[in-house]
Every structure is written in structure tokens, then in C-alpha cells.
Amino acid sequence: MTESFRRSGEYPQGDDHQSPYLQQQPASSPVNPEWPAPPVYAPAPPAAVGSGATGWPGSGQDGGGAAGGHGGGAHAGFPKQPAGTARKRPARGPLALIAAVAIVAAAIGGGTAYGIQELTGKDTVAGSSTSTTVVPTAKRGTVAGVAQAVSPSIVEVSATSNAGSSTGSGVIVSSGGEIVTNNHVVAGASALKVQLNDGKSYTAKVVGTDSKKDLALIELQDAPSGLKVATLGDSDGVRVGDDVVAIGSPEGLTGTVTSGIVSALDRDVTVSTDESQGQGQGQGQQGGDGQWPFSFGGRQFNGDTGSSTTTYKAIQTDASLNPGNSGGALIDMNGNIVGINSAMYSAASDSSSGSSAAGSVGLGFAIPINTVKADLANLRAGGSDS
């Protein structure tokens, strides 16, 4: 038989004489004798590389060895750098500073833009014809906001003549007391009185009239300081369906506010240019059915326009207009004047009682404000009727 020979004590035996390899393993870890032997030195502890940070030698991150292995050095697996020396990290301060500055700049930029909108009034409301707003921010886009902002710019105009008296409305267009109204409100008047929104009254004189556009410019005598001048908008920007507000003095009720929408554009409205037609028609206390006569589509409304007429393109609205609204303002939701109210349809009067029938039925017409702006120089020079 073949047996193996060894010298005495060459291989330790028994429970008290185990392999050094086995002594390094936890009792719960089985050992495969085919596994490679572990290193003959103890694993290196982590080295301090800075305040609150550690680095592992031989990781390939600080020059102590190749990545993932045990690099060279005084002893394999130990860091080359002296103990206690902090490892350099990539400089991150400038990049972080730039990012922070960019964020702050963006925030400031947004705030600045918002501030500019607040100061210049460039924040608009849907359904408004212009980019300028005079309505307070908290009430922007509301009828109440428009009324609050624009009512001080709308006045009541009372005209007296040999034929009687009439009442209409007007819009302040200069701090010196210039007021735009309809020609038919002041035509043939021997005296004019204007009542401001604060209730104070002043005498006024006619500066110029243009019967072909049914426009007139009057001016307060001894106009007070601090008059609220209306903001004239851009009627070319008005669209069908836009919300609008009307302010005037129907039936002598100063500062009445109504609202509606733009029903149509470019309506060919024909009105009378006869001076006698203008007297007694503004408030509906004199003559005919008490309404300023006009025609549209070949039909007469509110009486006979007579033989002397003129036709202009008008904005149609369903905002309630009644006698006395003539010369008042049609306003967009940003508080800009987009038209001067000039005509409205009303049911025929009751001839047996002599009283006027119900008021507005939602057919009102306004002279586009761009027509007014184009005619202001002419009116200030006396108008085409002078």
C-alpha cells in the first residue's frame, strides 16, 4: 500500500491547530479551499482628507493607485500623501455663484417687468381695444372699475335756445376744459351749461361744430384745475363681441352707467344736419317722439331726418342708451374711450298719452373715436360749419 510520509510536526492536527486562512474567516462563512489566499497584511484604514471627509487609499482618486486596485507607493494600498494633508477638490464656487446670480437676475427681471406693466398700464384685459389701461389693478376688467376710472371724465351738457332746452352728455378731452359732444346736442343753442361729475356746474361756449360727422367741441368758461381728461383709445382695435360700458346722462340722470357688447361695426348711420332737429331732442321733452332721428338701411328711426342729412360709419352696441346719452362715452374694459354715443332706436311714442314709450331696446350707435381724433384739429379751428 502506498502511504504518505511527513516529518513530525509538519502539519498541525486537531481542533486546536487550524489553518491560518481559516482563522481569518468568520465562523458563519464557509471556506472553499480553491479560493485564492487573502492578503498577508491587514486592510488599510480610511485616511482623513479634509474636514468631515474621508478617502480610501488605492482608490485611484488621489494618485494613491490605479482605480479599483492597490497602486504603488511606499507600501501597496497606502496613500502617497502625508497623513493629515487634505485632498484638493474641484473649484465649485464660481459656478455656484454664477447660477445663483442667474436665478436672482431672473427673479429681479420678472419683478421689474411686472413693475413696468403696473406703471405703464400695459397689462391688458381680454376684450379691450387698446394696450393702455386706466382702470385700477384690483378692478381691472370690471364694469365697476371702468365706471370708477372714467366717470369723472364724463359731463352733462344742457343747451338752451328759443326752441326749448335739451340735455346730452360730453367727454373731457383736455385739462383746459375742452369737451367733445354731438353736434345735435348743441346745435342752435344760445346758452350752454355743463355739470361735472362732482355736481359743480359751469357755463360753456361752442368752439367748433361738424354737422357732417355730428360732432362738436365746447369749452368750459373759467375751467377748474384738476379736470380728469379721458383717455382716447383706438376704435380700429374694436371687435364684435367686445365688452363695453356706456356713461352719460339719460333723462338728465347724470353719470348713469350701462354695459353691453359691441354688436356690429361699420354701420352706415344717417342723421340729420338740420339745426332745428337738434333742439329738444337730447332729453326727449320736445318734439316728435323725443329721440334724435336717424336712418339705417333705408328705414327711418325716431322720426323724420329731414332733407339735410349726413352718413357716417358707426359702432353698434347693445349697451342701453336713452335720450340724454348723446355725446357720452362708449368705453372698453381698459377704460379707453372707443366711441361717442350718438343715436339709439326706441319704440314709437304713444300719441294718445303724449308720453314716450319704453327706452332702449339694445340698438345703439356710436361715432368711432378715431373719427373724433381725426376731427379735433378741425373742431378747434371752428369746424367745417363755420
Image: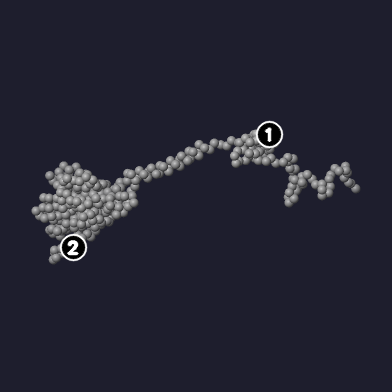
Q: Residue at x 11, y 55 (%)?
A: 164
Which mark identifies residue 73? 1
Q: Residue at x 60, y 38 (%)?
A: 50
Left or right relative to 206: residue 337: right
Q: Quadrant of residue 362?
A: bottom left
Q: Amino acid at mark 2?
A: Ala
Tell me, yes or no, if residue 192 can be seen here.
Answer: yes
Q: Which residue is mark 2?
A: 357
The image position of residue 142, as x and y in percent, is: 31, 54
Which quarter of the figure is the C terminus placed in?
Answer: top left
Left or right relative to 283: residue 333: right
Vertical order, 320 against 121 (above or below): below
Crowding near pointer 1: few (<14 within 10 Å), some, many (20+)?
A: some
Q: Residue at x 17, y 47 (%)?
A: 220
* Colouring convention used in this rendered image of the protein: one colour
Tell me, yes or no, if residue 184 can be seen here.
Answer: no
Please state the total of marks drawn on the protein image. Answer: 2
Q: Nearer the viewer, mark 1 or mark 2?
A: 1
The image position of residue 149, as x and y in percent, is: 28, 50
Crowding near pointer 2: few (<14 within 10 Å), some, many (20+)?
A: some
Farthest right residue in view: 1
Q: Residue at x 27, y 56 (%)?
A: 259
Q: CA distance from mark 1 to mark 2?
A: 111 Å
The image position of residue 134, as x and y in percent, is: 29, 48
Q: Amino acid at mark 1?
A: Gly
The image position of residue 157, as x and y in percent, is: 17, 52
Judging from the image, what secondary structure is the residue with disc 2 in?
A: loop
Judging from the image, what secondary structure is the residue with disc 1 in?
A: loop
Does the residue at mark 1 contact the one at mark 2 (Cβ under 8 Å)? no
Counting residues from the start of the chain, the first of labels 1 and 2 encountered is 1
